[in-house]
Image: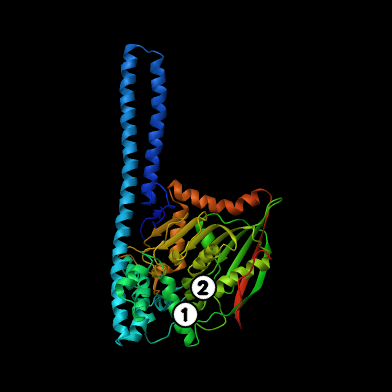
Amino acid sequence: MAEPPHGGALLLRGPAGSAISVATDGMLRQVERCAALSEAATAALAQLIAARALGVPGPVAAAAERAEQGLRRVRGLADELVVSVAAAAQAYERVELAAERRQRASAALLAGVLGSVARAGLALSLLALLANPGLLATAVMMLVAGRQPPRQEGGGVLDWLTGHPEVITSPEFVRLVGLVVTSGDDAVLGLLGVPPGLSLLLGDDALGLTGLGFGASSAIAAGAALGVMRETGVEVHRLGERLGGSAPAGSAERLARVPEGEAQLLLERYSAPGRPDRWIVYVGPTYDFAITGDQPFDMTSNLHAVAGGSPASLRALELALADAGASAGDELQLVGFSQGGVIAARAAESGAWNVVGLESHGAPVGVVDIPEGVRGLTVRHSDDLVPATGGPEGADSLVHVERRAFLPGEPMPPVPAPAHQREAYLVTARMIDQAESAQLRAEVERLDRFGADYLAAGGSLTSYEYRAERTAGVSGAVDPTG
């Protein structure tokens, strides 16, 4: 018998407007079974009533009446359970959202007060580090994003965290990170002299004039004044081209195809007779933790992606698509891990490409407005602090999957952030592929069919790998129309 995976169950939040907003995969499966039972009871009732209308002997009629009562009772209980679970899920979401809003408001007010105090000259440099979401996100993601930096002998913070991974691997710590990140704009406004109460009205939960992007932009401006965090030009180099292969089957296989190493981008071109090409694009995680250098999948791109700017890694993706021959009308399905996930989401948000599918793992996509109609999955661990640097996820057409990667007391691998590692997300992806609920199965199958349908129709698959490099100057986005 296979050993069960570590961690918790899959928690799902369906697309905006779905009947059941938040529920575990197992709960949804039970609801679906009850709904099917209700439909079966209704069909049996209709047949029984029709038979009784034809006239039956007395004893048979009495038995039929008892059967009808039983079927009505079964249908009523099944319907009641479906309604109760839906109401409980919606109530849970309302309570959670209300609690999060209160916590964010309190954190924002405190950050605004601290900003005002710092404006008076107290602990200015420390506040700028702790309260600015851009700097915090940079520090956090330098520690855990994608790859681990080389360790130094003799101790240090990284070595200590490697020996004590449980310190930052908990939903409570992740929520604290999220509160600090989302209140960074209030600290900046406080530094600028804006009263704390007024900063609340300008933030994400009110007018939306400030927020994560505002704080990250402040960090970029501060860095630019010091000669760092400036975006540059970018170019891509095709490393290889291969004809043939199969379409990915399942979430785990898609995540496994995300490149990490010499190549940062993998493009799969699906061509079928008489149809426009389709593309599955895999975007890799952070490759270099520097804020200066020749690698666009770095911390500068992370920060510009959170700020809603034009990160070099996003422009590298666009250049690779143009080089491989993608056009504006071709349908794209984007898959990314960590930085790759937020870059994929930004590409979908831009509207420059015909993105119809998106799958992100461990990515801070909450800061991105996913266009309505883009289908797919976002996958995050409740004990992974990297997705929290993007704030809470919004309402869109995606199915949001959350899971705790490590329950209290479970052994963790000796790395600083176990819940963010690809291996942990592969465990979750395999659980997604084995999900019981129809809602999650349907979304996985939708993503599977994107490439498989073309190959089944006699199409072909060509794969391209790319490596990106920064260049002097600043390059603009690619126009897919020409």
Which amino acid type corresponds to the residue marked 1 in the rendered image? Ile
Looking at the picture, how far across and down is residue 104, in whole percent?
32, 67
Query: Residue shown at 39%/16% (left/top)?
Result: 53
Q: Which mark is residue 31?
A: none
| Quadrant of the image containing the C terminus | bottom right
User: Circle 2 — which element?
Assistant: loop
In the picture, measured across the screen, residue 105 lies left or right of residue 217, that is left
Q: Which residue lies furthest to the right in this view?
A: 273
In the picture, measured across the screen, residue 339 lies left or right of residue 101, that is right
Residue 465 visible to the viewer: no
Looking at the picture, how far across and down is residue 22, in whole percent?
37, 52
Looking at the picture, how far across and down is residue 308, in whole percent?
49, 71
- Residue pointed to by mark 2: 309
Query: Residue shown at 55%/77% (left/top)?
Result: 296
- Label 1 or label 2, whichever comes before in sequence order: 1
- Residue pointed to by mark 1: 220
Cβ–Cβ under 8 Å for marks 1 and 2: yes
